[in-house]
Amino acid sequence: MAEPVQKIEKNDSLKSKPTKKIKKPARQLFLRREISWLIFNERVLLEAADPTVPVIERLNFLGIFSSNMDEFYRVRVAILQRLANLKKEEDDVELDFDPVKVLRDIHRKSVGLRNKADDIYKRICRELAAENIFFVSEQDLTEEQGVYVRRYFRETVRQHLFPLMLERFRNFSSLHDDSIYLLVDLSHKHNPTAENLAIIEVPTQHVPRFFVLPLGPDKRNLVMYLDDVIRYCLDDIFMVHGFTDCKAYTIKFTRDAEFDIDTDVSKSFLEAVSEGLRQRKHGSTVRFVFDKSMPKKVLATILKKFSLKRGDSLEKGGRYHNARDLVQFPRSLGTRKMQYEPMPPREVADFPHGVSMLDVIREKDVLLHYPYHSFQYIIELLREASIDPAVRTIKMTIYRAAKRSAIVNALINAARNGKEVIVFVEFQARFDEAANISWAARMQEEGVRVLPSIPSMKVHSKLILIRRKEHGANVYYTAIGTGNPNENTTKVYCDEHLLTADKSIASEVNKVFHILDDQKYQRPDFKHIVVSPFGTRRFFLKHIEREIRNAKKGKPAWMIVKVNNLVDKKLIGKLYEASEAGVKIDLIIRGICSLIPDLPEAANIRAIRIVDRFLEHSRIFVFCNDDKPEYFIGSADWMERNLDQRFEVIVPVKDPGLCRQIWDILQIQISDNVKSRLISVSHPNEKMVVPKNAKRIRAQMEIYRYLKKAPEEEMQ
């Protein structure tokens, strides 16, 4: 389906009107991003269903699937609902698609996925039972177990419970859309027919979602949901008020997470973002999930109370919601075979213990591959720079930091040691806005100079620049990555980090920081790195065009592109053109792929998706260039926002050994026949047909083994 004429992204005003209507293309060349995203999340769900995946890891994939669905509703569905409402209110708004119809398609697909997830969960529960692990509810407890549960409730849980009587409750916005609630139907001893409803938030932010009971005589491992602990002890809360019967049903709200930035010049941008965060609490409801066993009368009451219509993405659910908490399932209950084998990070031969990292980087470029390598190397690099008397300045961009960030602590300590530390913290990183504002305030207090965030442009690049005084001259050391400098996510996200002292690259990275500092936005001249929004689209179009010319001349022509999302129409159109010219194209797309490989135009395009224990996150680009391949890594996906509306940095990889390493890793991924799926609209998420005697290649395991051998080969 074609995209809307006026593309609505974060901070775009919904009051502005489209000025023209784009004609539908003669052929269906693009897949709607929302449908493509659901196909991707279905692929995540297939990992939860795969019997070859250890059973506790399958629970983890169910949790990832649920978390993905929550964010999908909070962002993409919310935008579609805004468009639908806008079209109702403004007669002259023209769209080349019907947002209401798309919402119906999404709802139908989402319900199907949720039902599939419920079936998979039941299957996993049976497999856990075969391993002597059982989920039990409040109805299954023996008297002895009940005593233990009540003690846990009174000592640990009750202090976090604050029931709200629905009759007197007014502030709907105080209900959190990332929480689950028990809607309690109460009967009073003096008036048993009166309607009495209460709401209790299940306090998963303070108490673990899962409670393990002590082993009994039968030696069974028993696990309760926190929801059921509360259900069992509801009488402890309500009996004292004269209620004699309590029945609880789980409900969950999902709200529109987008907010508009107030452009009032009297406010600082920090104030505007903070105000936007407060607005998010009042976002409209885009999904309401309720326990399907809830009586119709109770459901009607809650819908009326919160002004919810039956068409407002109502979903019948089961007894438990927020399946994303399954990632917190107590792994101590599982045996080794029920979980993935440990994969401790490989050592980087270039950085032996006791050797200065800056000395190494001065002599040669180094490429780190997470999570196969440890992010600790970056922390150590900043720590070394923070105490090195020759280091004068450290500059860095931060998009998402860990909750307890060693990176931030290293920067603060550098400032304490008298270094000039300059950090750009992105206040608009969705769902991390509050955390980033807090980090910025703390760093400022400690003497770090925090560059002001930019109202109209997110800074998504992953940059570190260290200036060191050597023999009276400035020497720069640069780290450019494909993912966030976050010690938590780098344990599970597959990303690359190039460490280099290349003068041409360092000087242009420094130029990026100057732009972020003065924010004057003159179009700069970059010759060695590629920077959005100044030239990334033009750069990629130019390189694809070169491959097209070479193909037409009969020269070798191919490209490999690995990104999270492929959505941009101009680049997709150019890929179709390249395919028709004979350019061989390999795409590795983790998430959204709006290109349709099934079309005749895409005959020379092969697109795959890999979903495994780690999240594929790196952006890598290789162009044939008449058999003189060029290699690039960076932070930009192939989406309009990454090309035109954000600061992104793409860097060339020049060292022949590192280029070979990238090539080998990409070839391993392209050859994956275990965890990869061909991206197809006609057969989405269908397994590849593998010849009977073919070697099984699971890319992430093969890369782990490859990176163990690579340093050994270098030392020989």
Image: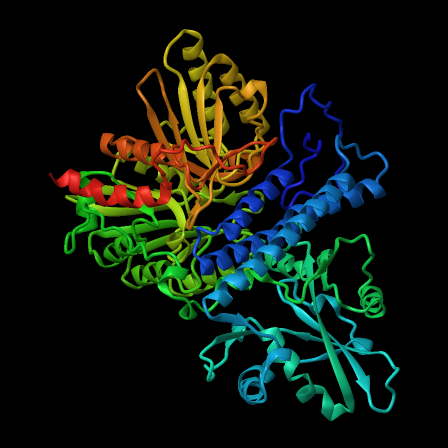
Q: Residue at x 58, y 36 (%)?
A: 684
Q: Is 397 above or below relative to 148?
A: above
The quarter of the displayed image where residue 205 is located: bottom right
Q: Is residue 473 visible to us here?
A: no
Residue 101 at x, y = what percent? 77, 39
For this rendering, which residue is in front, 528 or 575?
575
Locate residue 462, reporting x and y percent. 40, 45
Farthest-out residue, left: 716
Quadrant of residue 150 in the image? bottom right
**600 in relation to 594, above or below:** above
- Could you say where residue 61 lies in the image, as x and y percent from the top left? 50, 54
Label total for image: 0
Residue 470 against residue 239 in the figure, above or below: above
Place of residue 199 in the rendered image (x, y in percent of width and height, measured from the top left) = 72, 75
Residue 544 visible within the image: yes
Q: How is the image coloured?
A: rainbow
Q: Quadrant where the N terminus lies?
A: top right
Along the line of sight, the residue nearer the viewer: 646 or 86: 86
Question: Which residue occupies the foreground of this view, 148 or 176?
Answer: 148
**In the displayed structure, does residue 284 sit left or right of residue 547?**
right
